[in-house]
Amino acid sequence: MPTIDPRLRQLADNIRRYVKASGLTNAEVARALDVDGSAVTRWQNGERTPTVQNLMDLAALVGAEMEDLWKGPHATPATPEQQAMLLKMGEMTPAQQQALLALAATMTGEGR
């Protein structure tokens, strides 16, 4: 198997992560983007790189920004709720931020 450039590996991993989080199958994504059925799998494996237009369409389809696909979910809050949470956290003391993060961990099952 050929070595994949780390930047393209990150793109492939992020595409996989966002498609999975969207609840769509690869076949559904392929149909929505009007690409070959195996294209999405190849993008996720790093075997092929989507065109810029496909990246734009994919980002819109899975509710992300194009930058998120390149850099990961930490790049930019994608939803108004995420943006509002960041603004609120900026108003909190460090102790309040830690308490909120602990609460979020219990809500997502990470605190078990």
Image (cartoon, helix red, strand yellow):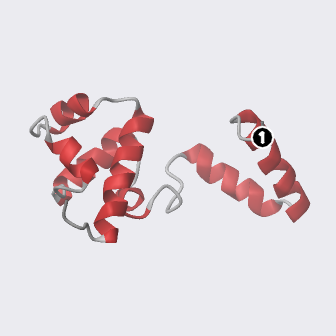
Looking at the rendered image, the quarter that the C terminus falls into is: top right
The residue that label 1 is drawn on is 111
Q: Which one is nearer the viewer's eye here, 4 or 98?
A: 4
Q: Position of residue 66 (x, y in %)?
A: 34, 57
37 in relation to 5, above or below:
above
Q: Position of residue 90 (x, y in %)?
A: 75, 63
Element type where label 1 sits in the image:
loop
The amino acid marked with disc number 1 is Gly
| Left or right relative to 110: residue 103 | right
Q: Which one is nearer the viewer's eye here, 74 or 105?
A: 105
Q: Position of residue 34 (x, y in %)?
A: 12, 37
**Residue 63 location, quadrant:** top left
Identify the residue shown where x is 25% and y is 34%: 26
8 in relation to 48, above or below:
below
Identify the residue shown where x is 71% and y is 34%: 109
Q: Position of residue 78 (x, y in %)?
A: 49, 50
Looking at the rendered image, the quarter that the N terminus falls into is: bottom left
**Residue 39 location, quadrant:** top left
| Left or right relative to 111: residue 3 | left
Q: Which one is nearer the viewer's eye here, 70 or 93?
A: 70
